[in-house]
Amino acid sequence: MVGDNVEVGVYATRDALRIAKEQELDLVEISPNADPPVCKVIDYKKFLYDQKKKQKEMAAKAIKVVVKEIRFGPNTDEHDYEFKKSHALKFLQEGAKLKAYVFFKGRSIVFKEQGEILLLKLAQELEDYAKVESLPKLEGKRMIMMMAPKKKSK
């Protein structure tokens, strides 16, 4: 009767405990909210071990989101822009999200429009590989834009 469900009601409580003692196993309450509560006669240590193993497998199967960052200045020249764009493309093809931002140092904050144009240009050139999650917005001394890779069609 190892592993069999035993419903524990008013009449079956003593029987279930007796069966568990006879088999040198534990009486474990599986569903306490059910009416009557559902119990199993099993080895409790093995039950805990199996639960931990299942949780570990679920955690391993969970998708881990990687976020890569690319930093620009408001006056980034064309060569540097192309170099960073190629890195962004590589990150997106690997399946990572991309956080592109323009960092404004000191008085360069007056070039907000240039920073926004730079980020929108990046989004336009990478539109075949990524979708924009958030448009460029200024947060302190940074203008940030988030991009996620497009799903590959099979």
Image: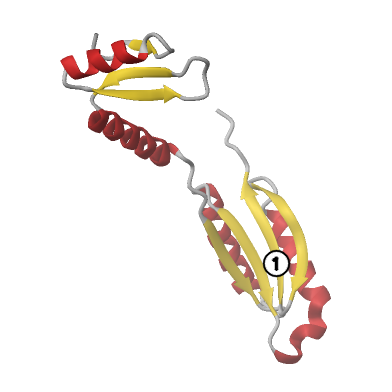
Q: Quadrant of residue 30?
A: top left
Q: Quadrant of residue 140?
A: bottom right
Residue 36 lies left or right of residue 139; in this view the side is: left
Work out whether 145 lies above or below 127: below
How many circles with numbers are drawn on the protein?
A: 1
Quadrant (top left, top right, bottom left, bottom right) of the N terminus? top left
Q: Amino acid at mark 1?
A: Ile
Residue 101 lies left or right of residue 54; in this view the side is: right
Q: Residue at (49%, 15%) from the top-left corner?
A: 36
Work out whether 124 lies above or below 105: above
Residue 124 in view, yes or no: no
- Residue at which label 1 appears: 144
Q: Residue at (71%, 51%) from the top-left corner?
A: 133
Q: Residues within 10 Å of mark 1 (few under 14, many from 20)?
A: many
Where residue 49 appears, as percent x and y from the top left, is 27, 34
Q: Residue at (70%, 49%) from the top-left corner?
A: 127
